[in-house]
Image (tube, coloured by chain):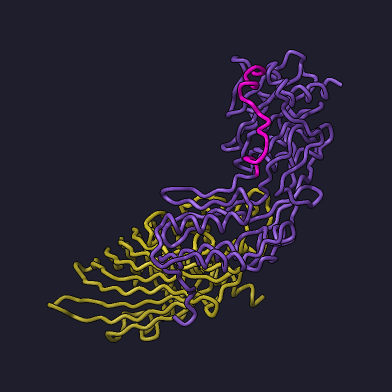
Amino acid sequence: MKVNAWILGMLLLPLTAALAQEGRESSTMFGVSAVSQWDTYLSNERYHGGGLTVASMVSRPTHWMDRRLHVQHLTQGNLALAEPRSDKHKTISGFFHWQVAWQYHFLREKGEEPSGPWQMNAGLGVQTRLGFVYNTLGGNNPTSARAALNIIASGQVRRSFELWHKPFAATLQADVPLTGLMFSPDYGQSYYEIFSLGHYSHNVCVVNPFRAFQANVLLTFDCRLRARTSLRMGYQGQFMQSRANGLKTQDFYHNLLVGFVRHW
Amino acid sequence: MGSCVSEEEFSNSPQGNFDALWQIVDEHYCFFPDKAAEYGLDWNECRSRYGAMLLPKMTGEQLFEVCAKMLDELRDGHVNLASPFNTARYWDWHENYPVNFSDSLQRVYLGTDYRLTCGIKYCILPDNIGYIYVPSFEGSVGSGNLDAIFTYLRLCDGLIVDVRNNEGGLLTMAQDLAASFINEKTTVGYIAHKTGAGHSSFSSPEAVRLVPSEGMRWQKAVAVLTNRRTYSAANAFVAYMKDLPNVTTVGDRTGGGAGLPYNNELPNGWTVRFSACPTYDVHMQSTEGGITPQHQVSLLSSDFARGEDTIIEYARKLLRK
């Protein structure tokens, strides 16, 4: 019974967060990306190129743990075009990334504004990622699908300061998958076998950071423009890689972001 | 990053490109055990023999020639090396044999008012035998198109399905067509894939099951016509059909091509294609070397002179019996 109540509580967390508007922060950012990709299912060559990204981040306090527990949603899309060193072929890739993390705010008085210039939050969350990489090489292996569901550790450090009599904030966030499940074709398995014939062969693999370390790192600078609005600029490194079924993948995105933050 | 995924990258030099090609084939090609048993192919020996021909300052054309000769050792029509100036290929599987097909003769049978849908030509021959010519499995054929074909031919006494000179395309189109000749879910073959870089690392073969077409299905006798240029997905179509009841195969041995081809690339951008997933017939026999028809028939020059296609005529006689 206690377990059921706990599960119900976890399910209701986003709802309780929705009701707690004060302390809420939402941002929308747009960016350009430098991309490095490698997928041995498609090609032995590394691909480099550029892309565009859009990210939305919403953080708000819950009523739990004296409002020190915040819930943070990150939704992001990436589109990229890349070429190998020969410039003879191309990959077109797209990713959709969504995560929710519950972070405990350590240096905060009971639900109030931070007592000092520093904020430190850490917690756990769930991350999903869907995507594809299409290679113009063709053949029966033109596309590689990406799908993953991870448990993540999420942490954030924020320092507030004043510059030119204006309030600024520098924030560093890191999200690291601890374990999870990902889709991968078997070493030489065709998507024809999977999707046309319904043959499965170790296509759901367990992810852990020792086999292939992954991380999402976000460094932002906020400049308060108005009482409830800040300009945000930042760098984001999305380091996604895998080693499964004898196949290796790497999707490294270095994003320069700019956007606005709305405070409540 | 402690557990960063990485691998040695070959240089864009004659040696680097040669090594990259050899390794891609070594780790992914699926017919090494078959070719070793058939004619003693030793891929390591090929590396030594052709690697000795490399020179640091050789031209791209010279490197291409060495790489193409090494790939020729695989004796596989699904193996190609494509550069901006040439495409290496192994076409002995049809070039060393009689063509056994003439589009001039075919025109005598089809006439000019034949029906055409999705690239499939069809007509009714004077002795009330239906004739379908499938030149390729590139693209797709919808159930509506197949319904139209079989509705038109439904009163025929028998059917010829001609896949001569059909060099393949999509397995799904071959399956869609074959599904018009079965009445229940039928295992028509098997497919496997590599599970690692080892030459003998394969998954357990899994059944390829066809689901009967929901549209009109052919119930009378069928003759499938083949020649040496019946290859790849067309070879698979013959493999699916040959053991079905009411179906007989007529013509020359098919060209084979029983490996699903994959593409990869070299540091200089040349594209390499190779067989990656082996397929088998319903008896778990590889059809890489082709399928011998139940009735081996060749075009006779005397028939040709009379404007007759020996293979079509033979099939008509079989179907009229």
Residue A136 is inside the magenta segment = no
Looking at the rendering, which quadrant does residue B70 occupy?
A: bottom right
Above or below A259: residue B310:
above
Q: The purple chain is which one?
A: B
User: Residue B98 in magenta?
Assistant: yes
Residue at image position (26%, 69%) is A233
Q: The yellow chain is which one?
A: A
Query: Residues in magenta?
Result: B93-110
Instruction: Name the one closer to the observer, B217 or B167.
Output: B167
Nearest the viewer among B151 and B110 is: B110
Q: In this view, does B110 lie above or below B99?
A: above
For the C terminus of chain B, the quadrant is top right
Residue at 42% over, 78% down: A67
Q: Where is residue B31 in the image (x, y as percent from the top left)?
A: 67, 58
Quarter of the image for residue A87 reads: bottom left
Image x and y of residue B7, in percent: 49, 73
User: Can residue A19 be seen in this snapshot?
Assistant: no
Q: In which quadrant will I find the N terminus of chain B? A: bottom left
How far from the left and from the top, in percent, is residue A55? Answer: 36, 62
Q: Which of A137/A59 is in front?
A: A137
Helix, strand or loop for the magenta stretch, by majority: helix
Residue found at the very far left of the displayed protein: A164
